[in-house]
């Protein structure tokens, strides 16, 4: 069984570019304010969700491993 991720969008940083929807349409949605939200706070590890976080122009998406809290994105220095 693979890792489960906790995915979070910092709404103070999100600019509503919808790049996350482009890269991972099943992982994100835009709300009425045109800001991104994960479709679920916990999801299976997913390359498309990671790609969405990496491509976010506002760097608003963080991903951690649910069990350990280990940073997936952005990676710890």
Image (tube, grey):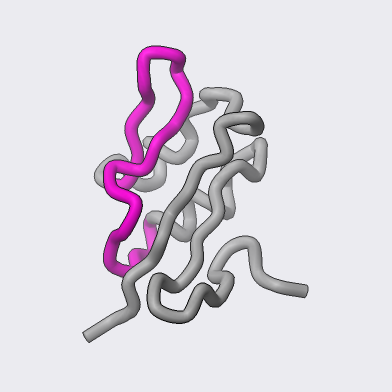
Is residue 47 or residue 8 the one in the foreground?
A: 8
Residue 45 at what x, y percent from top left? 34, 69
Q: Residue at x 38, y 57 (%)?
A: 48
**63 to 76, vertically: above or below:** above
Pinpoint residue 28: horizontal percent, then vertical percent.
35, 40
Q: Residue at x 55, y 54 (%)?
A: 62
Q: Is 13 placed left or right of 23 in the picture? A: right
- Residue 22 sits in which quadrant? top left
Residue at image point 49% right, 35% down:
19
Decide if residue 15 is on the left or right side of residue 30.
right
Using residue 41 as the reference point, say whether residue 55 is left or right of it.
Answer: right
Picture mark count: 0
- Vertical order, 31 against 7 (above or below): above
**In this view, 70 is above or below 21:** below
> Can you tell which quarter of the image residue 65 is in?
bottom left
Taking the magenta stretch, the answer to whether it contains residue 62 is no
The quadrant of the image that shows the N terminus is bottom left
Which stretch appears magenta? 27-48
């Amino acid at each position: 069984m693979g890792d489960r991720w906790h995915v979070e969008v910092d709404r103070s940083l999100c600019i509503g570019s919808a790049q996350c929807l482009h890269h991972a349409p099943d992982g994100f949605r835009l709300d009425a304010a045109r800001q991104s939200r994960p479709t679920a706070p916990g999801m299976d590890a997913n390359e498309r969700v990671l790609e969405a976080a990496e491509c976010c122009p506002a760097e608003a998406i963080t991903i951690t491993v649910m069990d350990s809290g280990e940073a997936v994105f952005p990676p710890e220095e």
